[in-house]
Amino acid sequence: MTTSTPTSPSSTTAATWPPGYRINPRADSLPADLVEAFRAIPVATAGDCMGRSVGALGLHGYHGNLDTVLCGTAFTVRVRPGDNLMIHKALTMVQPGDVLVIDGGGDLTQALIGGLMRTTCLVRQLGGLVIDGALRDRLEWAEGGLPVFARGHTHRGPSKEGPGEINVPVACAGLVVQPGDLVLGDADGVIAIPAAEAATVLQRAKLHLAKEALIRASNLAGTSDPERFSALLRAKGLPV
């Protein structure tokens, strides 16, 4: 007589999941020192170093303190709009410092996360949340201690029926996020940096900040080069 051993999510194949459901294992974390170094990089600077045309659009910070920086490894969730079953499951799988990135389709009719789940996030030492959807219990989120960016808010609560997917590529407010990417957020917005490019973007960002420091000093001293923009205009045919 043989006995069977229950399979874990990481050992199952795509064919075993019901349609619309999938739970993949957590992606490997980026080196802790690399993540920590990005806390000193403004989102705008990172965006400049990635072509100036990437990043989430239409998200708002609900954590109160504008100085709070969101920085960590992406743990992604895709849910049916207005349903948070898979978010609850994800919160049993995250590790300290992870950033929960939730693709809720931009729906604002029902909140995907609220004050009770915030308590769980704090206990799990989550690095923050990015939600293409709504939250509720705004006053609790405004107490700080956990950066959260969301599309909006509503008092209406969610269902817990599914379907949903965990640790899959998601589109969150125009931002493509792969599990394990570095997610960075501040008062200007939220950006995701592909894990394989994070070290390179960090070095570019440091050089960019040094360049900006020189320009700022020149502006303050009133010694900025007037030809900088005149040359650009002449190249377009303007007689300046």
Image (cartoon, grey):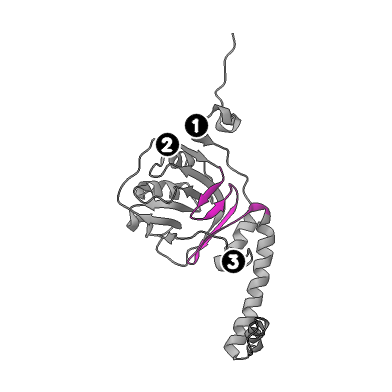
Residue at the spot 41% in from the left edge and 56% down from the top edge: 151
25 lies above or below 11: below
Q: Residues within 10 Å of mark 1 (few under 14, many from 20)?
A: few
Is 40 positioned to the left or the right of 162 in the image? right
Q: Residues within 10 Å of mark 3 (few under 14, many from 20)?
A: few
User: Which marked residue is nearer to the observer: mark 1 or mark 2?
Assistant: 1
Question: Extreme left residue here?
Answer: 155
Instruction: Report the amino acid beneath label 1.
Output: Pro
Q: Which residue is mark 1?
A: 19
Q: Earlier in the sequence, mark 1 or mark 2?
A: 1
Residue at the spot 42% in from the left edge and 65% down from the top edge: 65
Picture quadrant where residue 240 is located? bottom right
Picture quadrant where residue 87 is located? top left
Q: CA distance from mark 1 to mark 2?
A: 11 Å
Residue nearest the viewer, comparing 141 with 227: 227
Give the x, y percent position of residue 99.
52, 51
Give the x, y percent position of residue 17.
53, 29
Q: Which residues are magenta?
A: 168-196
Helix, strand or loop at label 3? It is loop
Is 123 positioned to the left or the right of 170 in the image? left
Give the x, y percent position of residue 42.
56, 67
11 lies above or below 179: above
Instruction: Report the amino acid beneath label 3.
Output: Arg
Q: Earlier in the sequence, mark 3 or mark 1?
A: 1
Q: CA distance from mark 3 to mark 2?
A: 36 Å
Q: Which residue is mark 3?
A: 52
7 lies above or below 23: above
Q: Which residue is mark 2?
A: 162
Give the x, y percent position of residue 167.
55, 42
